Image (spheres, rainbow, N blue to C red):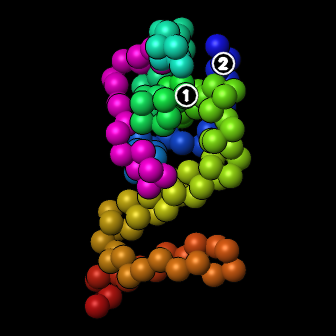
């Protein structure tokens, strides 16, 4: 049985986290008002609970669930097993963080009435281009 680890994250916006997970390939993600137990590799119910859950069937048959527990301050703690850290390593987490940032920028731009013009990568950095619809 793989041990679960808890990792603090910068994530506070559920909508942006869900969008980032989707862009990382996880379109089937559960969202719960009340935290639910995670399920381990042997279909064992674990004591760890999460509000946002990627079930193991959507990761790999050899995986455990991955979860995000919503803390009292609104931030999420990632709950991931030692086994799943191999696939969901620092590179994967950096990608998720980047997608989360993009989702946040897009959400803010929409609220301010900006039109999305495109996304480019310059020197390894992502640049999002917007136009103020009020400016014409």
Residue linked to disc 1: 62
- The image shows residue 59, relative to residue 65, as above or below, that is below
Query: In the image, residue 81 lies at what x, y percent?
Result: 63, 25
Query: In the image, residue 37 lies at what x, y percent?
Result: 45, 14
Q: In this view of the protein, can residue 74 be seen by the observer?
A: no
Numbered label attached to residue 2: 2
Does the magenta segment cover residue 26?
yes
Q: Tell me whether the residue at label 2 lies in contact with that at label 1, contact meaning CB atoms closer than 8 angstroms.
A: no
| Callout 2: SS | loop
- The image shows residue 55, relative to residue 105, as above or below, that is above
Q: In this view of the protein, can residue 17 be seen by the observer?
A: yes
Extreme-bottom residue of the structure: 136
Taking depth in this image into account, of 130 and 37 the one nearest to the observer is 37
| Callout 1: SS | loop
Residue at (47% x, 9% y) in the render: 45
| Span highlighted in magenta in the image | 22-38
Q: Is residue 115 left or right of residue 44?
A: left
Residue at (28% x, 83% y) in the render: 134
Does the magenta segment cover residue 35?
yes
Extreme-front residue of the structure: 61
């Amino acid at each position: 049985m793989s041990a679960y680890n808890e990792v603090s994250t910068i994530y506070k916006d559920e909508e942006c986290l869900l969008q980032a997970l989707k862009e990382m390939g996880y379109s089937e993600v559960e969202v719960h008002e009340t935290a639910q137990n995670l399920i381990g590799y042997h279909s064992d119910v674990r004591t760890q609970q999460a509000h946002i859950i990627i079930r193991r069937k959507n990761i790999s048959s050899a995986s455990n669930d991955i979860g995000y527990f919503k803390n009292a301050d609104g931030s999420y703690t990632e709950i991931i097993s030692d086994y799943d850290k191999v696939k969901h390593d620092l590179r994967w987490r950096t990608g998720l963080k980047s997608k989360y940032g993009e989702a946040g920028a897009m959400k803010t731009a929409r609220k301010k009435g900006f039109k999305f013009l495109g996304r480019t990568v310059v020197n390894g950095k992502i640049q999002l281009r917007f136009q103020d619809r009020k400016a014409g």
